[in-house]
Image (cartoon, rainbow, N blue to C red):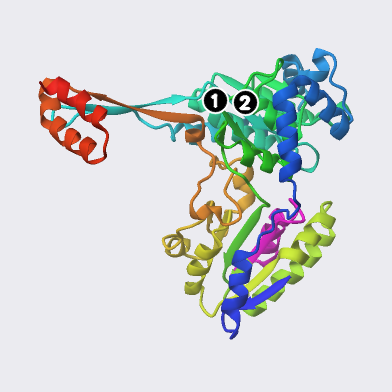
């Protein structure tokens, strides 16, 4: 765990190193992924069969071995304990309501030159969602990816998910049913992303791919950007908590561990103006961590990447937070609005002592698919807009072309494009 103080003489050097630190994998996987993408593009289902047998020990033969039937998803939903079904339905309802409010409006107007202008928003035809297996098999992530796509109006929604030895998480299937997913394929890894992007005899290609995954999935998405739309290339999860000493240190410790337990590469940072409070939080982290079922992962994350940062005054915190541009930022202070007004770069912000980040992962409503690794400087969380595109339109009559045409001709000629100019000149004559 790293301890920093803005009062230290070498603080700026150490903080700059923290900001620039890349916790994403250093492994050279680009060539391996490029080979997988090429194989799937050329050999389609045969390549998928070989990779799935090699990596997941799952044989793709019968239709059932390839694809989870809609009836199986419905059965998984029906088999849920009542309390869990209610919780999942509440989450879906709130996620849907929040994202419905994001739907953009079309524009259609006539300007003072008599030109009709505007834009129409339309959903993509098909979207692919990657749902991880293993440690990261979370039904909440499926809801967060699938529901915005359905709200946007996507007609065909495809899920790929690895099923090691044929086993699939029933909660994921239940969430797929609740969200209205159309297809669920038992394929994972970079090969699944390739299948979604290029299409095979069995799996139709999609227009947009979203969803988290391991380093190979992230690299596949990076390489396929431009072939299909990509939501983001996400790295390890992170949380920044800005807290004063009026908080219960147990609460803050639990918030820090809520991200640490995701992955050994996750990062949890506390900024506070009280060194004694920071020490109390650190003690609580140690105690709580020892009682977690996820202790091994959380402990490694906290020991390797955890940070306690002491400021002389919390007024210093927003500038530091903006440089970190964290995925999640909690403002656990009496008057969070003052700090919130100064935050420019954050994936999602949680205001006040009673708003733990964990509620945002499940039932608050805003999307929990957020930019990591300082990408909040230029990127936003997943939204309905990731599944939509805007088409502009123009309509002119003789009068409006007469007003604007000469300027278009002049610009076309100065750019050395005479055919552009002529296409306007002919109409003006």
Q: Is residue 366 left or right of residue 256?
A: left
Q: Residue at x 46, y 64 (%)?
A: 339
Q: Residue at x 70, y 41 (%)?
A: 213
Give the distance between the C-alpha atoms of the residues marked 2 and 1, in whole angstroms.
8 Å
Q: Is residue 292 above or below residue 313?
A: above
The magenta span reads 246-269
Residue 64 figure quarter? top right
Q: Which mark is residue 179?
A: 2
The residue at which mark 1 appears reads as 150
Task: Please report whichever mark, 2 or 1, sits nearer to the chain's N-terminal start.
Answer: 1
Q: Position of residue 312 (x, y in %)?
A: 54, 80
Residue 191 figure quarter? top right
Q: Which mark is residue 36?
A: none
Given this view, does label 2 or label 1 mark the residue nearer the observer? Answer: 1
Q: Position of residue 278 (x, y in %)?
A: 66, 73
Q: Helix or strand or loop: what does disc 1 sit on?
A: helix
Residue 332 colored in magenta in the image: no
Q: Helix or strand or loop: what does disc 2 sit on?
A: helix
Residue 126 figure quarter? top right
Q: Are marks 2 and 1 in contact (CB under 8 Å)?
A: yes
Q: Is residue 31 left or right of residue 416?
A: right
Q: Is residue 135 left or right of residue 333?
A: right
Looking at the image, can residue 33 be seen? yes
Quadrant housing the C terminus: top left
Q: Position of residue 183 (x, y in %)?
A: 68, 20
């Amino acid at each position: 765990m790293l301890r920093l103080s803005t009062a230290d003489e070498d603080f700026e050097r150490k903080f700059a190193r923290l900001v620039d630190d890349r916790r994403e994998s250093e492994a050279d996987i680009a060539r391996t992924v490029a080979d997988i993408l090429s194989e799937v593009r050329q050999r389609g289902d045969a390549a998928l069969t070989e990779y799935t047998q090699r990596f997941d020990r799952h044989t793709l033969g019968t239709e059932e071995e390839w694809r989870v039937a809609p009836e199986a998803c419905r059965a998984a939903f029906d088999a849920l304990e009542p309390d869990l079904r209610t919780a999942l339905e509440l989450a879906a309802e709130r996620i849907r309501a929040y994202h419905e409010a994001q739907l953009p409006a079309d524009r259609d107007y006539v300007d003072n030159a008599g030109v009709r202008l505007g834009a129409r928003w339309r959903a993509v035809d098909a979207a692919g969602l990657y749902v991880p297996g293993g440690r990261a098999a979370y039904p909440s992530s499926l809801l967060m990816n699938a529901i915005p796509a359905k709200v946007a109006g996507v007609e065909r929604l495809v899920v790929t998910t690895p099923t090691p030895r044929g086993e699939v998480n029933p909660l994921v299937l239940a969430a797929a049913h609740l969200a209205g997913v159309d297809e669920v394929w038992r394929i994972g890894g970079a090969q699944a992303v390739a299948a979604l992007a290029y299409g095979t005899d069995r799996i139709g290609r999609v227009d947009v791919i979203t969803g988290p995954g391991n380093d190979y999935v992230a690299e596949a998405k990076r390489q396929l950007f431009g072939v299909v739309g990509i939501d983001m290339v996400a790295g390890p999860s992170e949380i920044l908590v800005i807290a004063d000493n009026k908080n219960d240190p147990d609460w803050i410790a639990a918030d820090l561990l809520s991200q640490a337990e995701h992955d050994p590469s996750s990062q949890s940072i506390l900024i506070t103006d009280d060194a004694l409070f920071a020490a109390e939080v650190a003690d609580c982290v140690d105690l709580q961590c020892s009682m977690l079922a996820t202790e091994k992962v959380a402990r490694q994350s906290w020991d390797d990447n955890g940070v306690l940062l002491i400021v002389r005054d919390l007024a210093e915190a927003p500038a530091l937070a903006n440089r970190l541009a964290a995925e999640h930022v909690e403002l656990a202070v009496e008057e969070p609005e003052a700090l919130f007004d100064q935050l420019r770069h954050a994936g999602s912000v949680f205001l006040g002592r009673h708003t733990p980040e964990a509620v945002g992962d499940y039932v608050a409503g805003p999307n929990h698919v957020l930019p990591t690794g300082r990408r909040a400087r230029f990127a936003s969380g997943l939204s309905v807009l990731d599944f939509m595109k805007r088409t502009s339109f123009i309509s002119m009559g003789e009068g409006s072309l007469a007003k604007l045409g000469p300027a278009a001709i002049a610009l076309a000629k100065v750019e050395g494009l005479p055919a552009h100019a002529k296409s306007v000149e002919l109409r003006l004559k």
